[in-house]
Image: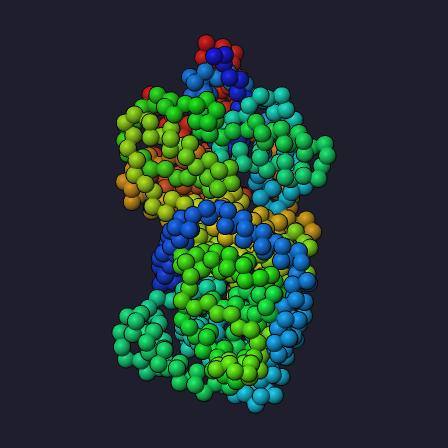
C-alpha cells in the first residue's frame, strides 16, 4: 500500500506549548505509514475569539486556515476541539457563497488523530508500550460535538502494560472552556478541582486526554496543588515504546 | 417575586453560593441521581435519538404554526364553557387573575407548581390583595414556608436543600417534631395541606401542554396535588406560557414520554391529567368556572429570531441536571427562576441584558446540555449566539476585551505576526518562568495563574523542530 499523505494541523497550543505532543504525533503517524506534511502558513483556528462572541474578528484566521489546507488530501490534528472548529467553519460561512464550499471541503477531510488512526487507517494497535495505571478524561468537544467517543479507548486498551481505572464523573467538563477559564476563573477553579479530585481517587500514574487545552488546565491545577499525576496527551502514550 | 429573584450581581452571587457546602453537596448528589435515571429510562425505551427527533419536530411544527394552534385551543375551550385570556405582559396576566379572584370574593388560593406563575410574580400580587396563597407542591411548599426562598431548579425547586434543612424549616414553621426521614416529612406536609384543600376558594395550576384539538390542559404530576387543586375549589385558573401547546393527544403522548423520562427517569408520572373546561351537566366533579390565561410576556418577540428554538423547551430540566457549572454554583446564582443552561439562554431574552448579560458566559460550551435536551434545543449554540449579540450587536463587551480580541484577530490571521509572536513568546515570558512553569503571570495570564501553573512557551516551537526534522529527511 502506498503511503498516506497526511497534512498536519498541529494547533497553536501544541505548536507553542506542547511541541513534544506534536513530535509524538508525527512519529506515530509515520510509523503507521503516513507521509507528513506541515504547512508553515497555519495559524490559530480562531476558536478563542469565536467562542467569546467575536465572530467577525475570528473570520480572518479561519479564512487563512481554509486557504492553507486547501491542497491537503487529509488533515489530521491532535485535538478534538480544534478538529471540531474546522468542521464548524462551514456553518460560520453558511451565507458566504465563496467561502462556504471551501469550508465544506475542509470539513470533509479533517480528522482528529485517534479517529484517523482507527477509522481511516483501520489500526487498533499501534504497538505502544507503557507500564502503569492510567485514567482517561474524555474531552467535551471531541465526544459530544465531533462525536469521537470510542477511538481513543480502542487504541489505549491495546497499549501493552497499561491498566485503566475509570475516571469518576468523567462526563463532566474540566472547567477549561477557553476564555471561560479566566473570565469565570472562580467557577473554573471549582470545576477543575473536582476533576483533579476524581483523578486522584483513581490512584492512576497517568491522566490521559486528547485535547491540549483541557490537559493544560487539569495539569496546571494539579501542579499548583502539588503531588501531580503525570498528564499525557494520547499521542505521547501511543508513541511510548 | 418575579423572574428576577434578587439584586446581587452574578459574580457576587456565585462567590457567596459556592461557599454553601450543603447546597453543593445536595446539588451534586441530585445531579448524579437524576442523570443516571434519565439515561436508564432512555435506554429502556430504546431508539432514544428517534424519539428526540420526533419531539423536536413536534415542537418546531407548533412554533411555526403557533397562531393557528392558539386559536384552535381557545376556540375549543370556549366551546366547553371556559374563559380564555391572552396576556401580553406579566402585569396583564396578574391583573386578570386578580380580577377573577376578587369577583369571586376569593380569600384562599391554592396553587400547584407552575414556573410561569413565578415568572409573572403572581403570588405577590394576590398576597397584596389580601389573599392567602398556598403552594401545594411539596418542594414549593417547603420554600414558601422558608420565608419565600426562591426556587433553584425548574422541576425540583427545593433541590438546594437537604432533608435536615427541611426538617428544620418544618420544626420552626409547622411545629414538626419528627425526624428528617423523607416519609415522615412528606406525611406531615400532606396532613397539613389536606385541610387547606378542603377550604380553598380558588385553584391555580400551570400547564405542561395544552391540547389544541380538544381545548384541554395537560398536567403531569407525581404528588396528586394538581388534581386536588383543580377539582376541589369552585373556580380554577390555569396559567400557561403561550408556546406550551400540542396539536392533538398523539403529540401529547410523545412529549409527556420525553418529559417524564428526561425530568425524573420515569416512564410516566403518577398522575397525568387533562382538564377540559368547567364541570358540565352530569359531571361528578370539576370547577364551576374555568379560566385559561395564556401568557406572552416576551415570548412572541423570540419567535422568528435566531433564538426561536429555545421556545421548544418542555421544562424537563435535563440540561440543568448535567450542567457542570450549575453543579458548583447552584440555581440561585443565576438570579432568575430559570437557572442552568436553559435559564442562561431564556432569562436574558425575557429579562434583558441589563440584568442578565453575564449568564451566557457561565458556560464552558461543553454541550452536555445540548446532548441531554429531549427536544434537541442547541443550547450551547444559543449561549454562543448570546455572546455574539452582546459583543457585536449590543457592543456591551469590556473595552480591554475588545482590544485583546482585535489584536487576536490580526495576530492569529497573519502568518508573519503569528510566527513572530509565537517565536518571541518564550523570551518574553522568561522573566516569569521558573522550571518551565509560570506561576505568577502578567496581564491576561494573571487570572489563569491565580489558580493554576501555566506552561512556559517552548523555546523550540513544533514548527521549528519540524523544519529541521524535514531537512534531515524525516524518518528516512
Residue B403, quarter of the rendered image: top right
Q: Is residue B89 left or right of residue A202?
A: right
Question: In x, y percent, where is residue B97?
Answer: 60, 80
Considering only vertical position in the picture, is B14 above or below A139? below
Q: Nearer the viewer, residue B60 or B79?
A: B79
Which color scheme did the rendering employ for the protein?
rainbow
Residue A72, quarter of the rendered image: top right
Furthest residue toward bottom: B105
Furthest residue toward front: B282
Q: Is residue A228 left or right of residue B321?
A: left
Question: In x, y percent, where is residue B119?
Answer: 56, 69
Q: Quadrant of the N terminus of chain B?
A: bottom right
Q: What's the residue at 42%, 32% (across, down)?
A: A151
Considering only vertical position in the picture, is B286 above or below B305? below
Question: In x, y percent, where is residue B449?
Answer: 45, 43
Q: From this viewpoint, is residue B415 visible? A: no
Q: Nearer the viewer, residue B230 or B350?
A: B230
Question: In x, y percent, where is residue B246?
Answer: 58, 61
Furthest residue toward right: A97
Q: What's the residue at 65%, 51% (across, down)?
A: B306
Q: Is residue B430 left or right of residue A51?
A: left
Q: From this viewpoint, is residue A210 visible? A: yes
Considering only vertical position in the picture, is B186 above or below B234? above
Q: Nearer the viewer, residue B445 or B364?
A: B364
Considering only vertical position in the picture, is A78 above or below B396? above
Q: What's the residue at 57%, 66% (across, down)?
A: B210
Q: What's the residue at 36%, 78% (across, down)?
A: B190
Number of on-image labels: 0
Amino acid at each position: 500500500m502506498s503511503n498516506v499523505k497526511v497534512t498536519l494541523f498541529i494547533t497553536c497550543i501544541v505548536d507553542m506549548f506542547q511541541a513534544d505532543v506534536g513530535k509524538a504525533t508525527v512519529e506515530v503517524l509515520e510509523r503507521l505509514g503516513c507521509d507528513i506534511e506541515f504547512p508553515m502558513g497555519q495559524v490559530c483556528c480562531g476558536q478563542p475569539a469565536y467562542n467569546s462572541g467575536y465572530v467577525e474578528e475570528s473570520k480572518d484566521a479561519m479564512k487563512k486556515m481554509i486557504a492553507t489546507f486547501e491542497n491537503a488530501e487529509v488533515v489530521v490534528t491532535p485535538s478534538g476541539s480544534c478538529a471540531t472548529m474546522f468542521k464548524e467553519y462551514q456553518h460560520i460561512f453558511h451565507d458566504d457563497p465563496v467561502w462556504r464550499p471551501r469550508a465544506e471541503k475542509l470539513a470533509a477531510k479533517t480528522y482528529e488523530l485517534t479517529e484517523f488512526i482507527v477509522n481511516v487507517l483501520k489500526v487498533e494497535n499501534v504497538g505502544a508500550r507503557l507500564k502503569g495505571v492510567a485514567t482517561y478524561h474524555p474531552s467535551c468537544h471531541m465526544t459530544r460535538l465531533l462525536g469521537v467517543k470510542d477511538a481513543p479507548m480502542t487504541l489505549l486498551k491495546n497499549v501493552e502494560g497499561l491498566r485503566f481505572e475509570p475516571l469518576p464523573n468523567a462526563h463532566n467538563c474540566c472547567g477549561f472552556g477557553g476564555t471561560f477559564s479566566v473570565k469565570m476563573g472562580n467557577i473554573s477553579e471549582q470545576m477543575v478541582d473536582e476533576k483533579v479530585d476524581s483523578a486522584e481517587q483513581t490512584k492512576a500514574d497517568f491522566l490521559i486526554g486528547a485535547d491540549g487545552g483541557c490537559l493544560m488546565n487539569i495539569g496546571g491545577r494539579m501542579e499548583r496543588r502539588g503531588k501531580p499525576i503525570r498528564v499525557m496527551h494520547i499521542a505521547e502514550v501511543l508513541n511510548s515504546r | 417575586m418575579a423572574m428576577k429573584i434578587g439584586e446581587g450581581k452574578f459574580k457576587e452571587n456565585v462567590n457567596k453560593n459556592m461557599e454553601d457546602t450543603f447546597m453543593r453537596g445536595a446539588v451534586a448528589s441530585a445531579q448524579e441521581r437524576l442523570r443516571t435515571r434519565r439515561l436508564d429510562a432512555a435506554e429502556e425505551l430504546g431508539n432514544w435519538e428517534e424519539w428526540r427527533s420526533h419531539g423536536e419536530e413536534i415542537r418546531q411544527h407548533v412554533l411555526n404554526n403557533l397562531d393557528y394552534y392558539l386559536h384552535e385551543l381557545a376556540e375549543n375551550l370556549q366551546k366547553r364553557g371556559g374563559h380564555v385570556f391572552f396576556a401580553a405582559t406579566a402585569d396583564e396576566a396578574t391583573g386578570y387573575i386578580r380580577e377573577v379572584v376578587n369577583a369571586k370574593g376569593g380569600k384562599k388560593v391554592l396553587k400547584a407548581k407552575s414556573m410561569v406563575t413565578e415568572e409573572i410574580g403572581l403570588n405577590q400580587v394576590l398576597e397584596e390583595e389580601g389573599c392567602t396563597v398556598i403552594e401545594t407542591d411539596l418542594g414549593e411548599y417547603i420554600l414558601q414556608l422558608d420565608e419565600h426562598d426562591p426556587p433553584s431548579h425548574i422541576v425540583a425547586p427545593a433541590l438546594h436543600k437537604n432533608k435536615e434543612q427541611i426538617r428544620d424549616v418544618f420544626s420552626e414553621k409547622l411545629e414538626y417534631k419528627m425526624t428528617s426521614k423523607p416519609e415522615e416529612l412528606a406525611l406531615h406536609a400532606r396532613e397539613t395541606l389536606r385541610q387547606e384543600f378542603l377550604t380553598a376558594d380558588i385553584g391555580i395550576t400551570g400547564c405542561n401542554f395544552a391540547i389544541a384539538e380538544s381545548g384541554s390542559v395537560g398536567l403531569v404530576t407525581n404528588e396528586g396535588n394538581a388534581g386536588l387543586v383543580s377539582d376541589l375549589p369552585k373556580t380554577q385558573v390555569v396559567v400557561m406560557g403561550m408556546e406550551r401547546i400540542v396539536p392533538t393527544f398523539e403529540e401529547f403522548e410523545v412529549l409527556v414520554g420525553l418529559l417524564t423520562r428526561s425530568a425524573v427517569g420515569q416512564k410516566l408520572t403518577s398522575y397525568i391529567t387533562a382538564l377540559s373546561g368547567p364541570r358540565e351537566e352530569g359531571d361528578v366533579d370539576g370547577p364551576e368556572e374555568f379560566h385559561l390565561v395564556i401568557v406572552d410576556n416576551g415570548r412572541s418577540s423570540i419567535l422568528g429570531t435566531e433564538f426561536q428554538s429555545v421556545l421548544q423547551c418542555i421544562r424537563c430540566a435535563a440540561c440543568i441536571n448535567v450542567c457542570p457549572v450549575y453543579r458548583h454554583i447552584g440555581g440561585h446564582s443565576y438570579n432568575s427562576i430559570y437557572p442552568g443552561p436553559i435559564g442562561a439562554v431564556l432569562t436574558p431574552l425575557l429579562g434583558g441584558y441589563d440584568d442578565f448579560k453575564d449568564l451566557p458566559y457561565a458556560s464552558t460550551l461543553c454541550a452536555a446540555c445540548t446532548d441531554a435536551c429531549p427536544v434537541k434545543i442547541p443550547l450551547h449554540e444559543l449561549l454562543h449566539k448570546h455572546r455574539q449579540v452582546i459583543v457585536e450587536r449590543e457592543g456591551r463587551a469590556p473595552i480591554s476585551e475588545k482590544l485583546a480580541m482585535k489584536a487576536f484577530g490580526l495576530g492569529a490571521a497573519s502568518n508573519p505576526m503569528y510566527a513572530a509572536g509565537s517565536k518571541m513568546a518564550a523570551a518574553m515570558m522568561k522573566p516569569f518562568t521558573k522550571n518551565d512553569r509560570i506561576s505568577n503571570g502578567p496581564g491576561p495570564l494573571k487570572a489563569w495563574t491565580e489558580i493554576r501553573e501555566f506552561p512556559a512557551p517552548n523555546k523550540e516551537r513544533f514548527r521549528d523542530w519540524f523544519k529541521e526534522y524535514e531537512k534531515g529527511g524525516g524518518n528516512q
